[in-house]
């Protein structure tokens, strides 16, 4: 499985200068190659290929020896990136998109990402080193936390974001083979919490941390201060930078939490099969108007789709599987007797008018998701065990509640 890991690095000032210098060369080569392509396209309606441009690199290096500072495959990758930008432009144009524009020149002080593909980098225990031929001869070796160890690294990129330096590591990790071990865990995923039930009939709740709540007011306050300044004034820019930083921090914290929680879930369950409701956006959008609350909060803060992606790949690495099933009506349906009722989002308890059972709405949904999965897949032994175990906890599923 191909995975990507972002890691912050802490260059010294001298190393920063080298990185900036090298990146600047990439920026120039990008702009130079772009100019050439644009000219050919606009004047002669001709397309220049990546190969043609790559073949010119040796000549360019003879004329302008500074380009030799950059590891040669990094320069090639820059041309490749330009090629990809052009390809998407051509394909948009081909589709008749009038608004399609060729790639733009990269402005001064733009840090062009440096892509080391297959070679030019080396990982050791707690460090990474990059090749270059900058005249300063300063070593580009950076500490990285020891928890990061990669078996097979395909590509490493160095980039800069809001004045901070990062590397992005593309690596290969082996998946474990999946075996259905007869144990299952079903999830009702939500914005506030995720509710799970396992084959033993045990319910577990995972409350979502909400860093967005913490940041919301602070972000709004700075935004308002910024908007009271004259645009492009020094104060405006200062607030703008602060604002971007806060937004990124908030997003990072959300993501971080999702990583930790998905890891915890995958590590702590004995079930090899994790079942979640299929949360395609399409379905969310086609929901009734009165469920607008759920809809908007999902768009603003949910990121549930991303959470499922994290859960899925972490599970695959340890031989578990995440399966998505249609969760239609799983919140409306009583898991005990199978009757249905409307469940507006504010109703936190499912109270059945037919059989009188009463339970947390998400617990009801998760039991429905489990029952549906087991019955749809004909896993009758597992289904019977689940029903028996649930009865021990006081939830007596009736026979007519079985999914057909
Ligand atoms: Zn009922």
Image (cartoon, helix red, strand yellow):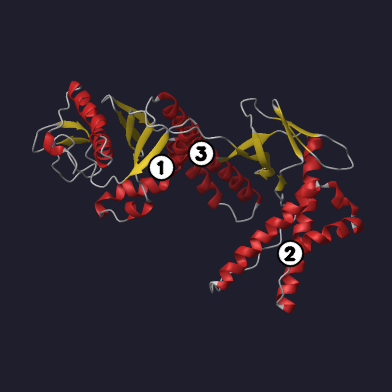
Q: Which mark is residue 40?
A: none
Q: Residue at x 47, y 29 (%)?
A: 263
Contact, CB < 8 Å: mark 2 with mark 3? no
Measure the alpha-carbon separation of dots 3 and 1. Answer: 16 Å
Q: Quadrant of ligand 1?
A: top left
Residue 62 lies, with reference to residue 325, above or below; the image says: below
On the image, the x and y values in percent for residue 328 come to: 26, 47
The reply to whether residue 122 is in sight is yes
Which residue sits furthest left? 354
Please state, as top left, top right, bottom left or bottom right, where the C terminus lies in the image.
top left
Q: Write down the quadrant of residue 311 in the picture.
A: top left
| Mark 2–mark 3 distance (CA, rounded to whole Å) | 36 Å
Q: Which residue is mark 2?
A: 34
In this view, the residue farthest toward the bottom is 44
- Position of residue 299 measured from the top left corner of the image (x, y, whole percent): 40, 49
- Report the quarter where the N terminus lies: top right
Can you tell me whether the CB of the residue at mark 1 lies under 8 Å from the nearest atom of ligand 1?
A: no
Q: Earlier in the sequence, mark 1 or mark 2?
A: 2
The mark found on residue 250 in the picture is 3
The residue indicated by pointer 1 is 304
């Amino acid at each position: 499985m191909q995975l990507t890991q972002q890691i912050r690095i802490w260059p010294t000032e001298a190393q920063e200068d080298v990185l900036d210098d090298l990146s600047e060369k990439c920026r120039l080569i990008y702009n130079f190659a772009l100019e050439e392509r644009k000219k050919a396209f606009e004047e002669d309606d001709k397309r220049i290929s990546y190969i043609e441009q790559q073949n010119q690199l040796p000549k360019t290096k003879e004329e302008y020896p500074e380009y030799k500072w950059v590891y040669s495959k990094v320069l090639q990758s820059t041309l490749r990136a330009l090629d990809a930008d052009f390809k998407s432009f051509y394909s948009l144009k081909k589709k008749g998109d009038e608004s399609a524009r060729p790639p733009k020149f990269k402005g001064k002080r733009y840090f062009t990402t440096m892509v080391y593909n297959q070679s030019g980098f080396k990982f050791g225990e707690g460090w990474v080193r990059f090749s270059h031929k900058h005249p300063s001869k300063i070593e580009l070796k950076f500490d990285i936390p020891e928890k990061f160890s990669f078996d097979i690294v395909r590509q490493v990129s160095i980039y800069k974001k809001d004045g901070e330096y990062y590397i992005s590591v593309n690596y290969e990790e082996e998946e474990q083979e999946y075996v259905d071990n007869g144990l299952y865990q079903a999830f009702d995923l939500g914005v506030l919490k995720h509710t799970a039930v396992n084959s033993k009939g045990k319910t577990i709740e995972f409350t979502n941390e909400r860093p967005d709540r913490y940041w919301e007011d602070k972000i709004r306050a700075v935004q308002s201060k910024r908007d009271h300044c004259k645009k492009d004034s020094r104060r405006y820019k200062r607030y703008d930078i602060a604002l971007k930083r806060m937004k990124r921090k908030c997003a990072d914290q959300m993501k971080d939490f999702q990583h930790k929680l998905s890891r915890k879930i995958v590590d702590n369950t004995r079930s090899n099969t994790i079942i979640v409701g299929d949360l395609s956006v399409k379905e969310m959008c086609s929901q009734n108007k009165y469920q607008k609350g759920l809809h908007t909060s999902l768009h603003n803060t949910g990121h549930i789709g991303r959470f499922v992606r994290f859960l899925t790949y972490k599970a695959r690495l340890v031989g578990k599987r995440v399966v998505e099933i249609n969760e239609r009506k799983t919140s409306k349906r009583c898991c005990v007797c199978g009757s249905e009722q409307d469940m507006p989002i504010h109703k936190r308890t499912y109270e059945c008018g037919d059989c009188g059972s009463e339970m947390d709405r998400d617990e009801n949904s998760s039991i429905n998701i489990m029952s549906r999965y087991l019955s749809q897949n004909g896993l009758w032994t597992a289904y019977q065990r689940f029903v028996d175990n649930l009865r021990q906890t006081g939830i007596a599923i009736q026979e007519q509640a079985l999914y057909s």
